[in-house]
Amino acid sequence: MTRTIFRPFSLGFLAFAAFLAIALAPGIAQEPSEKEAGAAAPSVLGARMVTTAQRGRLILDLSGATQYTIHAVTDPDRVVLELDAAGVEFDTPAEIAEPGLVGRYSVGMVDEGSARAVMFLTGPAKVQQAYALEAFGDQPARIVVDLIPDTAENFAANAKTAAPAASQADTASPDTQAQPDGASTGRPLIVIDPGHGGIDSGAQAANGLLEKNVVLEFAFKLQEYLVESGKFDVALTRDSDEFLSLEERVTLARENQASLMVSLHADSFSQPNVRGASVYTRDEEATDILDKVLAEQENKVDLVAGFSPPDGDNAVVDILVDLMRRDTRRQAYLAGDAVVNALDASVRMRRFPLRKADFFVLQAPDVPSILVELGFLSNSEDTANLNTDQWRDRVASALARGILAYFEQHG
């Protein structure tokens, strides 16, 4: 069967493109949406700062959406977030567990209707990304700011020239013009692999929701965000309800020389209280017994559907292939770490969310591959989320940001 799904999709200039432009600018300004315009300023409900020597993340919990700007300041070096707010509902923000890129921070009101969060730096840094999240379920609206190290020269220049970034209408650039199907753009190819399909329905929730349908809908949403970024070519292993063997999925990624393969799943487990998202890279030794069980379930798919993976002696491999595989797994781990970091503020995660298991679909020796478990269809709360457009939009946006962060840092 001819598979036209591996022609790169044309690029667009929607909201996510605007986000990319402002996330990399020296100063960042968020334009209000029509929904936010004229709305009462929210309260700042909570604040926390997580930091290491290589990263800093500020999260503000809010009672609603708001406008904000970010800029760098010297003497002392700091990054300042200004936002419209009716008040701050705490005296002091949560303490930093251990100082890193950010030594300390403060949050408070500076004027009527205006709040400020200040991150005091231990070294030069820049804003890697900044974004707002709408309230969803038991999670409040949020502003998230991620910092990464920078050179002293760049920081000083950014502090001197910091200004609001262009609005969405100004973000289109020549290198993001639409390309004809099949054209070579030089951008990394992201292969999204919605698990299961056709005669293989995957897991099933108590309400009848099927894993194969859940992950396909999510794949379309993730594809949309990645394409809108203007940074990637994107393809799906399947874009309809069809069965593909695990071997076929891996082969498609390899033959098309994918830069990253992202396999999507929403599994089930015998204990209904188990819930949350997680990200896997391949390792023959599973992280824990649950990971081993999930990997075995997925690897049996081909057998159940009447197929089986090819036989082969994995112990006898060429030394160059072995070296390639090691580097590929290292890149997969870095990609998984970036994705977990991006998802953390947007979705309920399992404890130790970056995990290892022996999933067959992650075995390509030359394509970094990660498997994202979006949640458990055996858990009622996860099932409700997985079947909600707002949740899928929120999480797909975060996953796309994680993929972008990986390529910016390691691509």
Image (cartoon, grey):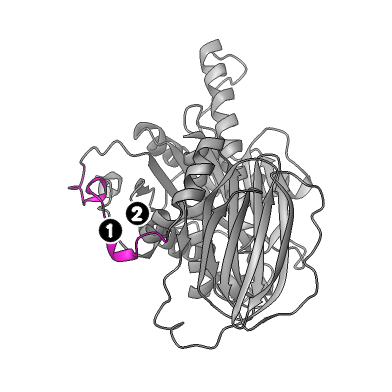
- Residue 111, compared with residue 153, is above or below; it is below
Where is residue 341? Give x, y as percent. Answer: 62, 51
Tell which residue pokes out farthest to the left in this image. 180
Give the residue type that dot 1 points to.
Answer: Gly
Residue range highlighted in magenta: 164-182
Where is residue 92? Give x, y as percent. Answer: 80, 69
Tell which residue pokes out farthest to the front in this image. 75
Residue 56 in view of the camera: yes
In this rendering, position of residue 363 left or right of residue 355:
left
Q: From the image, give the main secondary structure of the stretch colored magenta.
A: loop
Where is residue 20? Give x, y as percent. Answer: 41, 54
Secondary structure under the numbered disc 2 in the rendered image: helix
Specify the label residue 227 is tagged with: 2
- Residue 260, compared with residue 243, is above or below; it is above
For disc 2, the neighbor class at 10 Å (few under 14, some 14 to 19, many from 20) is many
In this rendering, position of residue 156 left or right of residue 98:
left
For disc 1, the neighbor class at 10 Å (few under 14, some 14 to 19, many from 20) is some
Secondary structure under the numbered disc 1 in the rendered image: loop
Residue 195 in view of the camera: no
Residues tagged 2 and 1 counted as in contact (Cβ below 8 A): yes
Q: Quadrant of residue 224?
A: bottom left
Give the residue type that dot 2 points to.
Answer: Val
Q: Nearer the viewer, residue 257 or 36?
A: 36
Q: Which residue is mark 1?
A: 12
In this rendering, position of residue 292 left or right of residue 78:
right
